Image: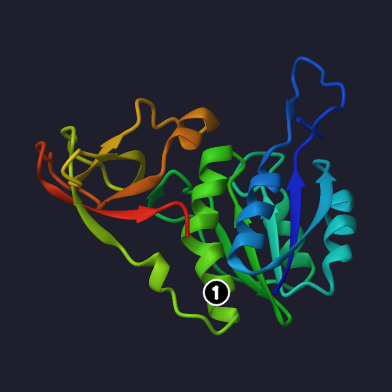
Amino acid sequence: PRVALLATGDELVLPGAPASPDQIVCSNPFGISALVTQAGGDPTFLGIARDTRDDIAAKLSQAQTADIVVTIGGASVGDHDLVIPVLKDMGMQLDFWRIAMRPGMPFIFGQLGQQIVIGLPGNPVSSMICSRIFLVPLIRRMLGLEDTDFAVEQLPLAAPLEANGIRQHYMRATLEIAPDGTRRVSPVGSQDSSLLAALAEASLLIVRPPEAGPEPVGATVPVIHLDF
């Protein structure tokens, strides 16, 4: 499947470009491109769209041959979150917007003609985890492949977990292997959705259902591996 990736936001600059104090390096499309390639897709980066309707529409018009259109950022409710209005002007049918998951609540899913549209949140960790949870299995299904490597596995905890809130939480975690081969999982120190270092440290996601109670060391929890 051909996957067109569009980053949005006046605050973004490409790696290597000079950045003002109120700008950050655009990292999401490169991590997502790697996920798309690994899943069997063919990614194309459309560049960075500035926070204007005209620029977003112009960049999206370059994605006409794509099977999946992925926007990054601009999916929330601020004054500069223009992705949904532009996509609707272009004829997108919005299936749903915003989901009860953490990280990644601002999430767009719709159809634009024969294209599938996914709108990811702008925070780097949210963007990558939403891609792993939604975009990767979508690509595999379009390839006619089974999602056997996406199956949830049950593993014991190496550290206790506090009670969860109202959203399903995909906690970044590491895998510990004892000398006898026993495997346990432990959440990384920070679950902040802006910290790529914590995501880079992680090898899997602990899936915490909404309103899940606290879990002690040794309790089994569902996990999804980040590598596939």
**Is residue 198 or residue 123 the one in the foreground?**
198
Left or right: where 68 falls relative to 160: right
* Element marked by disc 1: helix
Callout 1 amino acid: Arg
Q: Position of residue 30 (x, y in %)?
A: 70, 46
Which residue is located at x 83 percent, y 46 percent? Answer: 49
Left or right: where 158 falls relative to 149: left
Q: Quadrant of residue 15?
A: top right
Left or right: where 53 falls relative to 28: right
Q: Position of residue 28 (x, y in %)?
A: 66, 43
| The N terminus lies in quadrant | bottom right
Q: Quadrant of residue 116?
A: bottom right
The scheme the figure's colours follow is rainbow
Q: Position of residue 156 (x, y in %)?
A: 16, 47
Q: Position of residue 214 (x, y in %)?
A: 13, 39
**Residue 73, can we see it?**
no
How packed is label 1: few (under 14 Cα within 10 Å), some, or many (20 or more)?
some
**Residue 41, can we see it?**
yes
Which residue is located at x 82 percent, y 21 percent? Answer: 19
Which residue is located at x 84 percent, y 27 percent? Answer: 16
Q: Badge 1 is on which residue?
A: 140
